[in-house]
Image (tube, rainbow, N blue to C red):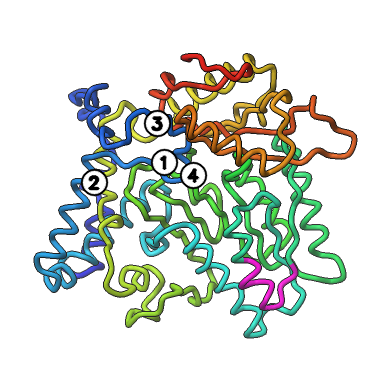
Amino acid sequence: MDEEEEHHKLNGDDNNNHVSKKQKLLQKFITDSEILNEFSHHQSGIARINNGSFGCCPASIIAAQKQWQLKYLQQPDDFYFNHLRKGILQSRTVIKNLINADDVDEVSIVDNATTAAAIVLQHIAREFVEGRYQKGDAAVMLHYAYGAVKKSIQAYVTRAGGYVIEARLPFPVSSNDEIICEFRKALEKGRENGRRVRLAVIDHITSMPSVVVPVKELVKICREEGVDQVFVDAAHAIGNVDINMKDIGADFYTSNLHKWFFCPPSIAFLYCRKRTGFREDVHHPVVSHEYGNGLAIESSWIGTRDYSSQLVVPDVIEFVNRFEGGIDGIRKRNHEVVIEMGEMLAKAWGVKLGCPPDMCSSMVMIGLPSCLGISSEADTLNLRTHLRDKFKIEVPIHFQALKDGENMDNDCGVTGCYIPTERLKETWCPWESGSLSFC
């Protein structure tokens, strides 16, 4: 069976990426003890309120990964010629169905969202270098874009002649309208002096501070304003918020599967929308003998390496479907519990959440009490180290400098409390007094 036949088979009615109604009635959901066994390899005594950085991979998926690794080590030639491409196509097809893409050829698997950003931004740089975009044409990104993505824009777009504009998003934020307003201002600035806005880079969920961005609305604005290409950096999105490529309408969209989707590190997908007139000039940064065969095929072989994390996506679907509601049920429960925990801490500390609950995913930002006296990035690092060393709590902390006229009573120091599962209801949490209480 060739790849095209396999493509149609995997996209047919016989795919098993979703649980049927009959199966749901007969299905026995995962138990608490089974969940504990799946994550028993985690270091005990550590409260990891930092799932957003590295994720958590269950034991059954690690076992499946090991089987792929052994298959390669036992007979590399058989693995390469008879299993690798077929296995990656199966993973791409699962992802295609999860994100509601039109075609599996729109989905490529790469190492992580940083790699995906490099692919997209190198493509944009070539548009400048080869004269299709003019020197000084603009690229717009959010002020809270991930640091590595900002560096990539600097490395590729700015050096190629692009003029980069940051949309200064407010934080704390109270509504989507505030984000939309600032984004429109950035686009308007981008059009000054006759410039064209060639690229918009939009986060679906900003990393730090963590806020769910109205990505569908921003993409629509880009279309109305004539922005050439839209790239959505959604590193935290899959398993955290609903993803629908047809609904969002971006040209490029990437998300990591090792953060909130239980895959082993590292794996991400890059969606590239097929459209009329689109130039096939999107390539993997590592050039192999597959160069020119399309990004998905280029990405499926970039030399001898461990591809096992890219091959276990079908196993991850089986794992999440052991939970009631599958990945949607997990996402809903995570959101409900993280809001409950965030509001509990905010009430105890006399502070506020960084944004309304409907702008939170499985992560919530909670203001730190001003009595802690946090006034610099160094203070946040010291506090994070103290929580790790003294209380075995691993949690990121975001510092935001005071604006003119503000004082410490405004609780400018903000902590991102990442609560990955409802089992962290039993986590030790720091309280204002400096002592600890079991919450």
Q: Earlier in the sequence, mark 3 or mark 4?
A: 3
* Image vertical order of residue 51 relative to residue 90, above or below: above
Percent across and percent down for residue 371 are 72, 23
Q: CA distance from mark 2 to mark 1?
A: 15 Å
Q: Earlier in the sequence, mark 2 or mark 1?
A: 2
- Where does label 2 land, which residue? 62
Q: Earlier in the sequence, mark 1 or mark 3?
A: 3
Residue 198 magenta: no
The mark closer to the camera, 3 or 2, is: 3
Q: Earlier in the sequence, mark 4 or mark 1?
A: 4
Specify whether 436 is left or right of 134.
left
The local crowd at label 1, few if under 14, some if 14 to 19, many if 20 or more residues have their Cα within 10 Å, is: many
What number is the disc on residue 237?
Answer: 4
* Image vertical order of residue 123 relative to residue 342, above or below: below
Q: Secondary structure at mark 4?
A: loop
The mark closer to the camera, 2 or 4, is: 2
Residue 160 magenta: yes
Percent across and percent down for residue 257 are 39, 49
What number is the disc on residue 46?
Answer: 3
**Amino acid beneath label 4:** Ala
Q: Secondary structure at mark 2?
A: helix
Q: Earlier in the sequence, mark 2 or mark 4?
A: 2
- What range of the chain is rendered magenta? 153-163
